[in-house]
Amino acid sequence: MILELGYEKRGVPPIIVQKIFTQIFSYINVQLFNSLLLRRECCTFSNGEYVKAGIAELELWCCQAKEE
């Protein structure tokens, strides 16, 4: 994924790009969690597990894209 974006050609170290994406996904995670807590009907174990699985799938996709 990093290679597709061309950051290395522009002189941005891969570790910086990785940290940026890590922070973005952490922010998304926090926002989703806060949204679940604010809505009583969404504050269930099954919804939490659903969000957790979705985030894990997104992280897996990013790791696989990085290897290509």
Image (tube, helix red, strand yellow):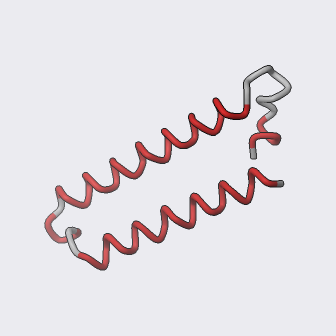
Q: Which residue is at a point 82% across and 40% down the rendered structure image? A: 3
Q: Does residue 33 sit above or below 53 in this rendering?
A: above
Side of 60 where 51 appears, left or right = left
Q: Which residue is at a point 33% across and 48% down the rendered structure image? A: 31
Residue 65: x and y in percent read 74, 55
**Image quarter in which the C terminus is found:** bottom right
Residue 24: x and y in percent read 49, 41
Q: Which residue is at a point 80% across and 21% down the rendered structure image? A: 10
Side of 30 where 68 appears, left or right = right
Q: Does residue 31 sit above or below 20 in this rendering?
A: below
Residue 4, picture quadrant: top right
Residue 62, picture quadrant: bottom right
In the image, farthest residue toward the left: 40
Q: Does residue 58 sit above or below 49 in this rendering?
A: above
Q: Which residue is at a point 73% across and 24% down the rendered structure image? A: 12
Side of 58 where 38 appears, left or right = left
